Image: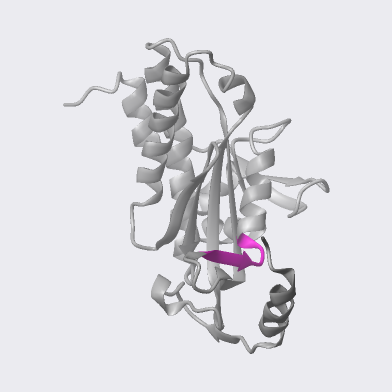
Amino acid sequence: MYNYKNSKQNIINILTSKTKIEEKDEIPHENEFTYENGVRCWTTAIFIDIRDSSTLFTESNKDKLARFMRAFTSEIITILSQDDKHYQIGIRGDCVYGIYSSHYKKDDVRVFDYACDINTYIKMLNKISSTYGYKSISVGIGIGSGHDLIIKAGRAGSGINDKIYIGDALVYASNLCSIANTRQYNPIAIDKLIYANVIEEHPKYKQWLHFSRDYSCKPNEFYHCNMITSDFNEWINGGMKNV
């Protein structure tokens, strides 16, 4: 039975304890986090979610659905883990996400490039899977960045813990993912900071990134596009031949 009387003192201990917050250029290694510290650093997150997944999950052949979801997640994870800047990559339901240290502007540009790779990959996945009787899917991709607080949370001694990200990066990425590829919005949605860093590196991208304002979403102002990776797309259109 849950001992709520003992829990009273546990809550008081946590609320009155001191937490040392440090500024870092990179998200520290797992073993550097304790229940008494936290870090602030620039963080960028990307979320990828299947649109109308409830329709997909009504597929009566569950074995067939399982194979499709493995294909969907496996290659997106491969794209997201191309460099050692990623701190955490995971799956929640049908959503795949990545969290990155982003002290430098080029870090945001790299995550945006991953979004373009994923947007192109969905085209390849649909083309291949259609030959095996699968329906085409569409996804929303959201990217957010922020100077966020990261703490370890859970119960000491239980072995159950995880990181909590307090700030804009994950909130913005998740929210933008939820509206990307819906209504009038394109598949990739990014916050204003990501946009500024991408345009500084690639000024020509400005013509393909469209500004929108939506007060049902936080952030209210963002940019969206349907950009793809050109050589990858040409390979798909050329029949995906391994030469």
Q: Quadrant of residue 51?
A: top right
Instruction: Please name whichever residue, 238 or 190, is drawn nearer the observer in this view of the structure.
Output: 190
Relative placement, left or right, of 198 versus 213 is left
Instruction: Please name whichever residue, 37 or 146, is drawn nearer the observer in this view of the structure.
Output: 37
**Above or below for 167 versus 208:** below
Relative placement, left or right, of 231 versus 203 is left
162 magenta-colored: yes
Q: Position of residue 95 (x, y in %)?
A: 54, 41
Instruction: Please name whichever residue, 225 or 48, is drawn nearer the observer in this view of the structure.
Output: 48
Quadrant showing the N terminus: bottom right
Q: Examine the residues drawn in magenta and state their main secondary structure.
A: strand
2 magenta-colored: no
Name the residue at 56% across, 27% down: 138
Give the mark count: 0
Q: Quadrant of residue 240?
A: top left
Farthest residue to the front: give it: 1
Farthest residue to the right: give it: 215
Instruction: Please name whichever residue, 164 or 174, is drawn nearer the observer in this view of the structure.
Output: 164
Residue 29 visible to an observer of this rendering? no
The boundaries of the magenta stretch are 161-169
Relative placement, left or right, of 110 versus 197 is left
Quadrant showing the C terminus: top left
Q: Position of residue 20 (x, y in %)?
A: 58, 88
Name the residue at 54% across, 85% down: 22
Q: Position of residue 205 (x, y in %)?
A: 53, 47
Residue 78 visible to an observer of this rendering? yes
Name the residue at 59% across, 18% down: 58
**Above or below for 55 versus 122:** above
Q: Position of residue 16 (x, y in %)?
A: 71, 87
Applied colour scheme: one colour
Relative placement, left or right, of 234 versus 14 is left
